[in-house]
């Protein structure tokens, strides 16, 4: 083992075509689809998984390169990575820039993607910041590959980003200080204002849909997006930390019959789990902190466990923390400390989030035909004493466990 | 202020009340399905007998017979291990820094808050010994102390008062690295000049110091009344024996102790170059042997120099140094603790004043990055104990009875601390820890006020 | 080991060795000479006959020190070494050939501390230290006479902790400073403690004077230098004058007093102030001093630029030898480390810099050696670039150094060609003729110069804005704020810049104009207005990035189409007979309101018979819906062709093809009645192609239907789409109300001109490639977006402030109109190599005078000299589409030419005369 230096060969990020074939064998293969395989392998060719099963999988692909590690999980998926979506990634002059897509705002040359990638996160849902009531479209993309949106994009329409509570109303001034913007352009200055803005938007949408009003240009575009939401094509990713916000979000969902809603950062979801069950919202939990989060929500350690028992769709997130503690790879550990079973914890960072944003056909589990996104672990996954020693993205060994 | 003798366990008993039912029994027996002594091999299904605060016997259950009058805690479901040792911490006090550049006359005991949430948290995470020192924003800081994270008064907590003095090579706000280094040297230069003047005035039979001391009503009786010749490895001032120690200015006395090698120094280093500054100043004033470097992972480039100087290190910060290449923009990580282990430098990890990154987590993470399990565990128990010079950190007969009972392997994410024993006193019981229950499932305990302050590691970029 | 090179400049009493070799053993120089036999087993490095080996440069200044000082005016105990980061990797310095550097303890105090000398490379502290406490570092200039902003702590815990007050000791005037120095010298003599100066100062000074340390005192203004010289004469300590910007008039006195000087090349590339008494940098000070016989070392305020700045400072006739000595041996001597560094001599440290030519004649650093080890060398790619650069250097360096001759030895036409020797005829403001010999009309004045080049173009400057930061809209004519050349403009022109593209500070989302004009000219100032349209790609909110640019081009496009169509019609139109025409005109007018974009013939028929699909004026617009209910291939297709633009939008819901709604986009071909659209579904690409067919429905009447196929991967299925709604285009939606036809005046039926929109004209030009779009875009990903977006409109944008360009150059090079660069931009030469036209810009007002320096600096960093020249003149003009007026010395162009006393872009060359529009520029 190489002590001291952990150098990550991210050179492949430059995006060379992944044509080589590879077989990774492990003591434990956690597929996130059915039971774990003890002593199994994953075979990869041309960026896709071509074989998963017990044994060593020799000869499953021709001219293969072989690797052996302690355990394998699917590439982790983070629905709230907060990468590169600073205050300037969200429209500030409008509370509901619904038709804007964050895809246009991402800097794919940023080193932050590499940081996520080497700690095992292979796909993320990038969202606009939480400073507008409805901030625009979030898109699902890989954290590596050629630095072109089309090359990394998994789903341009991952979710429609909304936020409850104080953050959208707090900012009736430019995101980075400066002179306050005229408040006619930044209406809501209170929670109720935010709620009203959201309600108004969807009310108009429903009305327009009902009366078949023909809309022009942007209005039409926005209506298009909202139609998809109302039709259940597009989930709403709604930030709601404390109970107050969670309630509001759930009520709005029921009021407008929004089919799919995902609560982002719902640290206080433990307070009224029944409400969540009834509303049918999915939940994305923030990285664990003891006690109060910076948004003032109290984060109980067993939140994840509670939600799991009640069958609430559950995903964990890392918020792109610089500190290892905050990275997604450690979040399932904390959830397990709070009583969440391992399998559930695994699903909460792989297949469940994939389903939530409609990319489960390509990523989220180790199944033949899916993208070859793997995380290779030095020990039992999610234990702090284990580390991500290797990452395979689109069949390419972007972090090599052999340390080169 | 008069010094208190380190108190006796019994005395502690009186002070223990933070958790109901905490009793300092003369005899305490701890049973555990597994005992990690961290000294030699593990003991399956073992027993530890503690008498008067110290471990009287330790071994397999059948080898030790339980005294009839002993309190018994634990059971086969538990894993027993020595209490974690926090090698360096700024927590549990109101403010960590004074505004004066050189303030060795300050004493941390005046700022420690016994009911600070931090100490309570320590027990929750199994920390039984804490070395409290002041913050880095100084040139010469105040004196620290070693405490048990338990007790109603500072005196009750004290394990070793006026232990450790903080020096900082990291520039105090408003200083450049050059001026910081100069200020450090000047501090000792001034001390020397002061002592020489003192001796001179004594020889001229003007005896200013004595008179001032009498005037201020300082103690010229007892041991401090007779002068002692100055000892010191690097430099000494001849004729100091003429001066009663009690007569030496309070502001200078602590530094004199340092130069005479009677005080341990905790030297803050922020960048590699600071290490060289710190070491040279320690050498020039002869307290290298008593120096502990408090370094950040960024200092990894200077670890060779540290190894050469043979001083121990407290890695107070992230375990890895993240470096972003200015040209390529690519980020690389260096596992500092790993390099320390490679170079054979004795080192301790700290919980970075954070409750989610407590010592068990740091140790576990270190293992994750490739450190051997033994080294990792040692880095949060025996090696800090060695650095502090307290006989805890392993479970052996004669050592202090600081023991943690966990629900499983200490490095496993699902293991929780069930019981904590400090010097034979059963000071923590999770079943009675209401606030832990709140952290777990949110139930607000009646009568508690503030919840823990958030410990969110913010992203620097 | 042995190092060979064509030329070895030992600097030891100017000795130069041709084809020599240096023998190195354990980091020290063993021997140097022409015919030494290399010991067996010695490793030999040969840099070839062209390479020049010089001693490693000695920088007498360091800028990496924190300016924070102590609260004391005199602090001779402060050790610079304490502040030096021995772990730092100084690649920038090594690249600049600097192997040893003086370390400043801190600045801004009368006596701020003890300086040190270190190597710029080495593993351990010990290896790097050359000398500690080698000089007392101080200043009597302004910096030392302003109150130190140190923060005073509150009353501390114990009241008798003393806090020093700097203010009392702090000199406010030059005489105060000198007085202070005298006191300190006196104090040093006694070595006594002086509380007013602070504890330890006296003894420390005594130690320093014991060791005979030089007092390195910085003085900037002339009077400060004078005062310091007087002080030096009487002080009885060794004084070295630092900075000495204003020393020229004092040269003789300095020489007489035998006071050495460390001249610091002032920072260039910034505005210098416009008021009469503003002192703009004078780089010829060292020449003057050395001429007067003083010892001068040259330092740079930016040590990484030392080599370049030394060449700059050799203006006014400083010989290369003297210049080289001033950055190697002399500083080493002055700072007392000449026993180890500063020259190539047996016994000294093996620190070398290897260059492509003489360091002070445009040599580029090929390698830097330190303590006998290779400390820096460029990568292979750089080697190639350097080889190219070297060839050019050869050609230029064959030219003898400045001497007055009868003809111009060289005429640098600007496009790379050189006429040597050559003549130019300037006639009535234009260039009448160029060639080896040109006619000499009677009475023509004959001027002799060494070298001639076209006036320099600043591709984006602010001279003339006079500080204004307003951003005008596109239809604003910048001529209105132009003023005839004043003194500043003339000085700028004499600095070489004759044409400036005056651009407003900042960009506007609606596009901002710029004007190309000649600041110094009195008449015929305007070259082109508007010259460019400048915009910013990135929006404060990244989501909106590019929207502005796209929409402007979009607007421009439709505006252009209007005109194209008008011209098309005009071509077709011939006056027809009266009565028919009248009705037509009438019909026309109403039609035009309705649909301007409809071809003429369509409408004629339409009047006859409505309802017939063939004659439907608008066969496409509206919604087309196709529903397929049958079994597995179940889908619902919606297509919305937009009128005019020919774009098609739509969407598709088809479980077999995609889990979610598929967004479709495509185009509609009016003539072939064909429609193509495609989109990305969750299960791959979907393509729709359909044709418009008139089909009889149940009611036996023909109606339009879209008949086509829907293809997804291998599967494909037929469909027929009905129109659910149609919308007739409303005339001039984008252009506001159309002008009413004046049937009376206009000949009957003549197509009417669309409204002329001054704000849109420039954009139209851009689309027609007749004007330039300058986009401010920095991030790599955005550059790619920007260029692709523009190329969709057939526009090749010119990029500005494109720091991220290097990472994506290969992807965009072919689609670029060019790039505006300055010396700060890295690796610009690569772009040029890819054939991307470059143009230098200053982004400053009168600071534009340093534009030539920027170019020269780029050459230093590996850009080919003639490439740099082109980027200053012809390429710049081409790129800005003003090449018909300026940028080259060619017949018919404006007579903007510069006379030089040496090859262009050699920092040592200065401009002797300048002509703008054929008139010589003369200040005062």
Image (spheres, coloured by chain):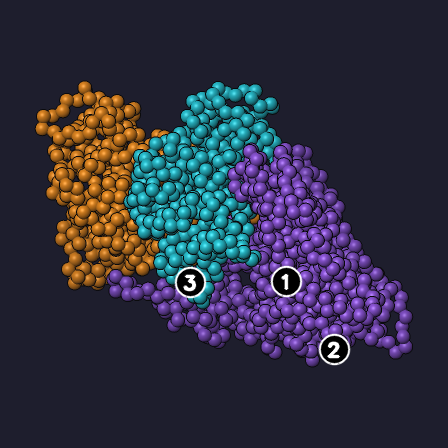
Question: Can residue B137 be seen?
Answer: yes
Q: Which mark is residue C730?
A: 1
C181 left or right of C434 in image: left
Relative to the observer, which residue lies in front, A200 or B288?
A200
Image position of C847 with respect to A277: above or below: below
B27 left or right of B236 in image: left
| Residue sitting at x 76%, y 51% | C391
Image position of B162 with respect to C286: above or below: above
Which is in the foreground here, disc 3 or disc 1? 1
Q: CA distance from mark 3 to mark 1?
A: 34 Å
Relative to the observer, which residue lies in front, B56 or A274?
A274
What residue sits right under mark 3 in the picture? A187
| Helix, strand or loop at mark 2 | loop
> Which chain is home to disc 3?
A
Chain B on-screen colour: orange
Chain A on-screen colour: cyan
Q: Which mark is residue C523?
A: 2
Colour purple belongs to chain? C
Crowding around mark 3 (Cα neighbors within 10 Å: few <14, some 14 to 19, many 20+) is: some
| Residue sitting at x 44%, y 35% | A351
> Measured from the top left, where is residue B44 in percent x and y?
26, 22
A20 left or right of C914 in image: left
């Amino acid at each position: 083992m190489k002590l001291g230096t952990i150098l990550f060969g991210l050179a492949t990020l430059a995006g060379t075509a992944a044509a080589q074939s590879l077989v990774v064998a492990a003591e434990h293969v956690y597929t996130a689809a059915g039971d774990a395989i003890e002593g199994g392998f994953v075979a990869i060719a041309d960026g896709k998984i071509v074989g998963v099963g017990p044994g060593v999988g020799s000869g499953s692909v021709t001219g293969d390169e072989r690797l052996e590690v302690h355990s394998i999980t699917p590439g982790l998926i983070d629905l709230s990575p907060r990468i590169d979506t600073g205050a300037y990634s969200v429209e500030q002059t409008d509370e509901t820039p619904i038709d804007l897509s964050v895809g246009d705002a991402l800097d794919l040359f940023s080193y932050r993607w590499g940081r996520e990638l080497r700690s095992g996160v292979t796909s993320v849902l990038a969202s606009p910041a939480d400073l507008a009531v409805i901030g625009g479209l979030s898109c699902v993309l890989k954290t590596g590959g050629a630095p072109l949106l089309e090359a990394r994009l998994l789903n341009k329409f991952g979710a429609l980003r909304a936020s409850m509570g104080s953050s959208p109303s707090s900012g009736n001034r430019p995101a980075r200080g400066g002179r306050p913007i005229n408040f006619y352009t930044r209406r809501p200055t209170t929670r109720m204002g935010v709620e009203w803005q959201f309600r108004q938007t969807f009310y108009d949408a429903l009305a327009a849909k009902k009366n078949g009003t023909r809309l022009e240009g942007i209005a039409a575009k926005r209506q298009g997006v909202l139609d998809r939401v109302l039709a259940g094509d597009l989930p709403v990713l709604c930030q709601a930390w404390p109970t107050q916000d969670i309630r509001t979000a759930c009520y709005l969902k029921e009021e407008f019959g929004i089919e799919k809603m995902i609560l982002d950062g719902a640290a206080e979801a433990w307070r009224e789990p029944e409400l969540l069950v009834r509303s049918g919202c999915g939940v994305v939990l923030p990285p664990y902190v003891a006690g109060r989060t910076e948004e003032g929500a109290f984060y109980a350690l067993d939140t994840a466990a509670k939600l799991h028992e009640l069958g609430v769709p559950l995903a964990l997130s890392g918020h792109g923390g610089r500190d290892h503690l905050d990275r997604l790879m450690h979040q399932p550990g904390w959830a397990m400390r709070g009583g969440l079973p391992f399998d559930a914890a695994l699903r909460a960072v792989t297949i469940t989030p994939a389903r939530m944003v409609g990319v489960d056909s390509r990523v989220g589990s180790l199944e033949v035909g899916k993208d070859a996104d793997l995380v290779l672990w030095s020990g039992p996954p999610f234990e702090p004493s284990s580390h991500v020693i290797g990452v395979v993205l689109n069949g390419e060994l972007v972090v090599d466990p052999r340390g080169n | 202020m008069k010094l208190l003798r380190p108190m006796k366990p019994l005395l502690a008993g009186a002070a223990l009340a933070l958790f109901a039912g905490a009793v300092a029994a003369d005899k305490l027996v701890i049973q555990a399905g597994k005992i990690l002594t961290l000294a030699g091999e593990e003991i399956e299904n073992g027993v530890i007998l503690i008498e008067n605060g110290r471990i009287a016997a330790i071994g397999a259950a059948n080898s030790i017979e339980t005294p009839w009058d002993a309190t018994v805690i634990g059971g086969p479901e538990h894993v027993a291990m020595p209490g974690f040792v926090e090698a360096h911490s700024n927590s549990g006090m109101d403010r960590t820094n004074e505004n004066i550049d050189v303030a060795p006359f300050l004493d941390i005991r005046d700022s420690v808050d016994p009911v600070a949430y931090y100490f309570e948290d320590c027990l929750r995470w199994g920390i039984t010994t804490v070395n409290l020192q002041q913050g880095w924003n100084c040139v010469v800081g105040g004196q620290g102390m070693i405490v048990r994270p338990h007790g109603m008064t500072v005196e009750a907590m004290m394990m070793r008062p006026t232990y450790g003095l903080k020096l900082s090579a990291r520039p105090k706000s408003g200083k450049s690295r050059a001026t910081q280094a100069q200020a450090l040297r000047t501090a000792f230069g001034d001390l020397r000049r002061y002592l020489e003047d003192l001796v001179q005035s004594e020889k001229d039979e003007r005896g200013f110091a004595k008179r001032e001391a009498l005037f201020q009503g300082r103690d010229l009786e007892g041991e401090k009344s007779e002068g002692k010749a100055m000892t010191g490895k690097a430099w000494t001032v001849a004729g100091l024996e003429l001066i009663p120690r009690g007569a030496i200015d309070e502001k200078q006395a602590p530094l004199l102790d340092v130069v005479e090698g009677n005080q341990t120094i905790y030297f803050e280093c922020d960048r590699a170059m600071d290490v060289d500054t710190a070491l040279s100043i320690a050498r020039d004033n002869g307290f290298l042997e008593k120096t502990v470097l408090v370094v950040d992972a960024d200092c990894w480039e200077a670890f060779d120099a540290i190894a050469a100087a043979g001083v121990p290190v407290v890695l107070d910060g992230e375990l890895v140094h993240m470096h972003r290449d200015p040209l390529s923009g690519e980020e690389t990580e260096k596992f500092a603790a790993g390099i320390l282990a490679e170079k054979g430098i004795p080192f301790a990890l700290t919980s970075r004043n954070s409750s989610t990154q407590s010592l068990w987590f740091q140790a576990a993470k270190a293992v994750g990055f490739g450190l051997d399990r033994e080294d990792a565990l040692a880095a949060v128990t025996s090696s800090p104990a060695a650095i502090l010079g307290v006989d805890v950190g392993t479970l052996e007969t004669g050592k202090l009875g600081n023991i943690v009972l966990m629900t499983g392997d200490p490095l496993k994410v699902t293991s929780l601390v069930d019981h904590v024993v400090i010097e034979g006193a059963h000071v923590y019981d999770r079943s009675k820890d209401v606030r832990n229950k709140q952290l777990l499932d949110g139930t607000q305990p009646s009568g508690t006020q503030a919840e823990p302050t958030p410990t969110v590691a913010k992203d620097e970029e | 080991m042995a190092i060979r090179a064509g030329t070895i400049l030992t600097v030891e009493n100017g000795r130069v060795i041709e084809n020599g070799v240096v023998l190195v053993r354990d980091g020290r120089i063993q021997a140097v000479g022409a015919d030494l036999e290399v010991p067996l087993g010695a490793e030999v490095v040969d840099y070839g006959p062209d390479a020049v080996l010089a001693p490693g440069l000695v920088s007498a200044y360091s800028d990496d020190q924190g300016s924070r000082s102590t609260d004391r005016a005199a602090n001779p105990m402060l050790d610079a070494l304490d502040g030096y980061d021995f772990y730092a990797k100084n690649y920038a310095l090594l690249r600049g050939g600097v192997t040893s550097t003086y370390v400043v303890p801190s600045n801004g105090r009368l006596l701020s501390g003890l300086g040190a000398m270190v190597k710029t490379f080495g593993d351990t502290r010990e290896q790097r230290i050359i000398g500690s406490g080698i000089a007392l570092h101080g200043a009597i200039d302004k910096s030392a006479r302003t109150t130190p902003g140190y923060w005073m702590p509150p009353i501390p815990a114990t009241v008798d902790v003393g806090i020093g007050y700097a203010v009392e000791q702090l000199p406010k005037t030059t005489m105060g400073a000198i007085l202070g120095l005298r006191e300190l010298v006196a104090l040093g003599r006694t070595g006594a403690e002086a509380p007013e100066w602070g504890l330890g100062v006296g003894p420390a000074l005594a130690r320093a004077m014991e060791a005979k340390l030089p007092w390195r005192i910085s003085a900037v203004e002339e009077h400060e230098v004078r005062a310091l010289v007087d002080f030096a004469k009487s002080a009885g300590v060794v004084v070295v004058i630092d900075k000495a910007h204003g020393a020229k008039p004092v040269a003789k006195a300095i020489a007489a007093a035998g006071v050495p000087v460390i001249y610091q090349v002032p920072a260039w590339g910034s505005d210098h102030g416009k008021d009469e008494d503003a002192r703009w940098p004078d780089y010829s000070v060292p020449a003057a001093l050395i001429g007067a016989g003083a010892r001068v070392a040259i330092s740079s305020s930016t040590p990484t630029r030392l080599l370049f700045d030394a060449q700059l400072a050799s203006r006014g006739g400083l010989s290369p030898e003297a210049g080289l000595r001033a950055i190697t041996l002399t500083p080493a001597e002055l700072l007392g480390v000449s026993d180890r560094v500063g020259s190539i001599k047996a016994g000294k440290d093996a620190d070398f810099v290897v260059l492509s030519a003489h360091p002070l004649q445009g040599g580029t650093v090929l390698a830097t050696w330190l303590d006998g080890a290779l400390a820096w060398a460029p990568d292979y790619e750089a080697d190639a670039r350097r080889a190219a650069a070297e060839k050019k250097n050869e050609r230029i360096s064959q030219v003898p150094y400045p001497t007055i001759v009868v003809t111009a030895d060289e005429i640098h036409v600007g496009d790379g060609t050189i006429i040597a020797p050559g003549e130019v005829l300037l006639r009535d403001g234009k260039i009448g003729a160029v060639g080896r010999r040109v006619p000499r009309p009677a009475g023509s004045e004959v001027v002799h110069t060494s070298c001639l080049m076209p006036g320099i173009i600043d591709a984006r400057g602010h001279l003339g804005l006079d500080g204004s930061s307003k951003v005008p809209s596109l239809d604003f004519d910048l001529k209105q704020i132009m003023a005839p050349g004043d003194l500043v403009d003339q000085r700028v022109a004499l600095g070489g810049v004759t044409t400036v593209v005056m651009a407003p500070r900042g960009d506007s989302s609606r596009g901002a104009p710029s004007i190309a004009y000649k600041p110094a000219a009195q008449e015929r100032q305007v070259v082109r207005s508007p010259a460019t349209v400048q915009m910013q790609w990135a929006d404060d909110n990244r989501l909106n990035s590019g929207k502005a640019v796209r929409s402007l081009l979009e607007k421009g496009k439709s505006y252009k189409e209007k005109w194209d169509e008008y011209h098309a019609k005009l071509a077709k139109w011939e006056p027809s007979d009266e009565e028919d025409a009248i009705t037509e005109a009438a019909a026309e007018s109403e039609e035009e309101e309705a649909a301007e974009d409809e071809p003429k013939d369509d409408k004629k028929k339409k009047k006859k018979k409505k309802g017939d699909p063939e004659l439907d004026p608008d066969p496409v617009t509206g919604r087309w819906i196709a529903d397929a209910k049958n079994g597995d291939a179940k889908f619902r297709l919606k297509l919305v062709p937009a009128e005019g633009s020919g774009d098609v939008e739509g969407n598709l819901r088809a479980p077999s093809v995609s889990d979610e709604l598929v967004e479709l986009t495509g185009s509609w071909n009016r003539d072939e009645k064909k429609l193509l659209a495609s989109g990305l579904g969750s299960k791959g690409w979907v393509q729709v192609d359909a044709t418009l067919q008139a089909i009889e429905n149940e009611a036996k009447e023909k109606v339009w239907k879209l008949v086509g196929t829907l293809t997804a991967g291998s599967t494909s299925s037929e469909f027929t789409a009905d129109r659910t709604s149609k919308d007739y285009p409303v005339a001039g939606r984008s252009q506001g109300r159309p002008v009413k036809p004046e049937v009376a005046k206009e000949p009957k039926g003549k197509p009417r001109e669309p409204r002329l929109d001054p704000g849109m004209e420039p954009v139209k030009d851009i689309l027609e490639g007749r004007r330039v779009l300058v986009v401010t875009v920095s991030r790599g990903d955005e550059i790619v977006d920007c260029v692709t977006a523009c190329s969709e409109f057939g526009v090749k944008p010119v990029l500005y402030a494109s720091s991220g360009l290097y990472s994506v150059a290969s992807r965009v090079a072919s689609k670029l109109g060019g790039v505006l660069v300055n010396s700060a931009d890295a690796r610009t030469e690569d772009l040029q190599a890819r054939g991307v036209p470059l143009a230098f810009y200053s982004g400053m007002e009168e600071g534009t005078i340093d534009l030539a320096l920027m170019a020269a600096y780029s050459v230093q960093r590996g850009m080919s000299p003639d490439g740099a020249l082109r980027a200053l003149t012809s390429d710049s003009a081409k790129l800005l589409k003003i090449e018909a007026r300026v940028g080259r010395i060619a017949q018919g162009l404006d007579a903007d030419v510069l006379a030089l006393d040496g090859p262009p872009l050699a920092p040592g060359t200065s401009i002797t005369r300048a002509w703008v529009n054929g008139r010589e520029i003369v200040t005062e």
